[in-house]
Image (cartoon, rainbow, N blue to C red):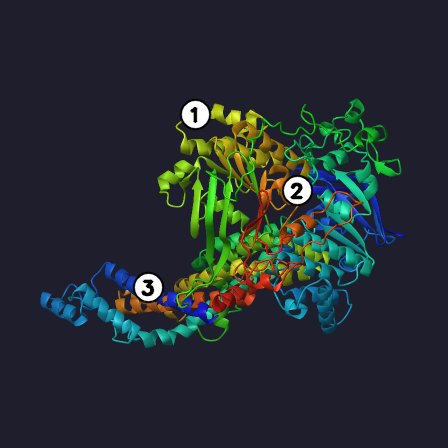
Amino acid sequence: MIRTLTARLVSSIMVVLGALVLVFVIVYLLPGDPVFTILDPATATPEMIAGMRAQLGVDRPLYEQFWDYAGGMLQGDFGKSLLNDEPVLPKIIAHFPATLALTVASSLTAAVIGIWLGVLSAIHRNRWLDVVVRIIGLFGISMPTFWSGILLILIFSVNLGWFPAMGSDGWQTLVLPALSLGLVGSGFIVRLVRNSMLEVINEPFIVTLRSKGISERLVMYRHALRNALIPALTMIGVLIGDLLAGTVVIETVFSRQGIGRIISDALMAKDLPVVQGVIFFSAIIYVLINLLVDMSYSIIDPRVRRLNARRQAS
Amino acid sequence: MSTLLEIENLTVQFNTAKGLLTALSDVSLHIRAGETVCLVGESGSGKTITSKSIMRLIDFENGIVSGGTVKLDGDELTAMSGRELQNLRGKKMAMIFQEPMAAFDPVFTIGSQIIEVIVRHKLGSRKQAWARGVELLRRAGIPEPEARMKQYPGELSGGMLQRAMIAMALACGPELLIADEPTTALDMTVQAQILQLLKELQQEFNMAILLITHDMGIAAEMADRIIVMYAGKVVEQATASQLFGQPHHPYTKGLLQSITTLDSIRKSRLPSIEGTIPGLAELPEGCRFHPRCPHATAKCVQESPPLLKVNGRQAACWYAGELAGKLGDGQAVVQTNGQSASRPCSPADIVHLEPEPGYSIPSPFIDIIEVKKYYPLGRSIFAKHTSSIRAVDDVSLQIRRGETFGLVGESGSGKSTLGRMILQLEQATGGDIRFEGRSLTGLSEGELQKTRRNMQMIFQDPYGSMNPRWKVSDIIGEPLRVHEAMNASEKRIRIEALLESVGLNPKWADRYPHEFSGGQRQRIGIARAIALRPSFILADEAVSALDVSVQAQIINLMQELQQELGLTYLFIGHGLHVVRHVSDRIGVMYLGKLVEIADSEELFANPAHHYTRGLIASIPWPDPGRERIAAGIAGEIPSPSKPPSGCRFHTRCPAVTARCREEEPKLAQVRNSHWAACHFPA
């Protein structure tokens, strides 16, 4: 276990370092001059521009800029906003809980709806329930979140008045955004779990269970589902990352606080240190999620646990 | 004995995309309490569906009982609700399956799966169930049962899992145990152990067994009565001695003749049943066996024969009474394609082999010199030295031009690895392999490709070894495309000729693999192997996956091709009687070592190594009167990562001494052209 954990940690660190380089390159390639985020292009004199370049450090050779940036990032210094000199990292940390809550809530929504409908659909294969579930799943995948978000606001907020349409205080404000984001995810999970279940249901051990007199409910939910979740789990890990990215749109639609909101505002204003900071921060979170998913395999699948134990023994 | 299970006129249909298919028609059979009944027939005969219909497991596969009755102890099963059936399944009737590896849920421990069934049928608390589970595992011959209870299925060998499966099936004391090919996926040594265990437990638990098997040897050994099925119908029903003594149905006769036994004439042409079993969608009118039956008349084509009492047994053949005399002498032949039945190869047919004076023979065709194959275990950046699996350890042997060399041993003995090293599909860790005097180990990519056209392979699973999206002409044509400069029409002519030479219709070249039966696919595999006119063919378990009648066809084909094309075969198999039948010489491998090598007849007549003796003793004989002479081998093959010291077989050997534990025996001559690696050869 420790051996596997170390190996996974090492590869995770490599990914984070890769992200560090990539973020720098992307931001460097972005069109527009960061100087004009601060200076007005109409009034700025060449001297002012040169001065600002020196102040921002963008006049130095690229590798020097990179070392400064990378060194700072790795020590937790994400730089300051070009707009108001506010340090980037504290700002991200202050806003992250709201985004985390939304990601977790929408992931749970996606997982619960997706797994439940997926199993139902597989059990009732090719009957009307299956058809209905597959259509719902198709909707889930196809609806853009900004559209489903607005639809949810119209129905549950404007017409029914059940949940608030905006804001980020209290659990009520979380319901509609989580649902809107979670529906997309559940569409993927339904398909995944359905296929995976159908495969498992054809395994010989299912016949054994039935020949033992075990009830269909137990055969499906205790035995088949646990086997079916193993391949679905990897995808769910990737999906959580997608949901994290989806918060950019949802936080805007529902006027919520959060790092998605920060990055969209910063992009509009060409506030590059903030953009860099949020992307790098998200990359770290993404890697952490996948690390957790990998770890959870060994909880569900004893074969993985045993493999790890054997590797350690030899 | 009272009747436990009574099936009358059972008809079962399946709802499929092609419409309603009838899988069983008018099946009637009964089993008395404590009796063993064997259900035999080729795949597609309806054996498994019969067993699943009794358990009503067909309900989950779109199957419906559309006629007839199934009574267990007087209870009508076909009329029961799902819940009532669940209460019977696992309790009054239990089932064990063909592949123990796949029949356990991989993510639950063995123990929890045994406990589950006991608790389900309310036969005790979890704690009592645990104790009973341990007891059952112990009774099923599993060492350290407490530890096994906590293990997952992936941690046990196939043999151990099948024992655990039996333990689980017996957990609630069933009156009927259905065993669906319980030993087919296991080694022969383990098969003998499992069959013995079933016999013992049957006595102890006083239960009836319905044993499904394709192996007539197993049926002879286990059955009180035998039921032969063909294309969804019962064609014959008789006691074991009646059936083997005088089969009444031509199909039964064909089955019995197709099997190779240890006293059949080696290299002779095996009688086989022509053609293959029809699919459910294309069942013939009249007697379903008539297209393959040499005795078929107009009546057989038009009218389906009922199962009638003849000479104290049941047979579904219009001419059962008349044919019985003709069929019964054990020499008669079902159909042999116009040739005489047992045509031994004339001396001119086979390359004459002089008995060689030494273990090494001069200028061998293939010379394997001290070959090793080690697979590293657990590659790690931190560990300094790695342990390894010694799949093949220091094996030397020679194969002569034109002979068939047989290689036998349990799984894990290294026989397949050795075969693949000859073809350079695996790189040897040490040693050398010479093909016609040239070393293969140091060849460049280009030279190797040139050499490979002389060395081809026939695989165990013909379907798995073909691209399902390629036409047969592409599959057979691929080696031609790689190695020969041919234009399209030349290639086409060659492909059609190849198809014809393996007994297939040349017009089928544009079909896809799934349109063929298993036996036909294996013929395609053979056509591909001989496309380049190779001199050497590796046949790795080439007939193991086939039904007996088809197996005989393929063996005949391989022997014909050998004579026509002067092929040399390395024939790897776990069915000893088949290997004996086709091979001139045989090597026996155990845990990566060659432990015995001799001429085929000599090896079976005077096995010197105790392992070989045990292997031979494990073969089930298709003769119900015969008692087993010697016990098989106890235990299972140890892990090749930690082979035992000294003689690797010492842990299972009945004649083990202190010397065997310490000193590794070398191959030594025991008789003329017979070597064994044993300190105390028999």
The amino acid at mark 3 is: Ala
Residue B49, image x, y percentages: 73, 45
Depicted A273 relative to depicted B549: above or below? below
Residue A115, image x, y percentages: 57, 60
Depicted B587 relative to depicted B502: above or below? below
Tag 3 subunit: A
Q: Nearer the viewer, mark 3 or mark 1?
A: 1
What residue did someone put label 2 on? B577
Residue B226, image x, y percentages: 80, 43
Please tell me if label 2 and label 3 are on a single chain.
no
The answer to whether residue B194 is seen in the rendering is yes
SS label for mark 3: helix
Q: Are marks 2 and 3 in contact (CB under 8 Å)?
A: no
Report which quarter residue B631 is drawn in. bottom right
Q: Please rate how many residues cluster around mark 2, counting C-alpha atoms within 10 Å: few if below 14, some from 14 to 19, many from 20.
A: many
Q: Residue at x 62, y 32 (%)?
A: B556
Please tell me if label 2 and label 1 are on a single chain.
yes
What residue did someone put label 1 on? B488
Q: Are marks 3 and 1 in contact (CB under 8 Å)?
A: no
The amino acid at mark 1 is: Ala
What residue did someone put label 3 on? A19
Task: Identify the disc placed on residue A52.
Answer: none
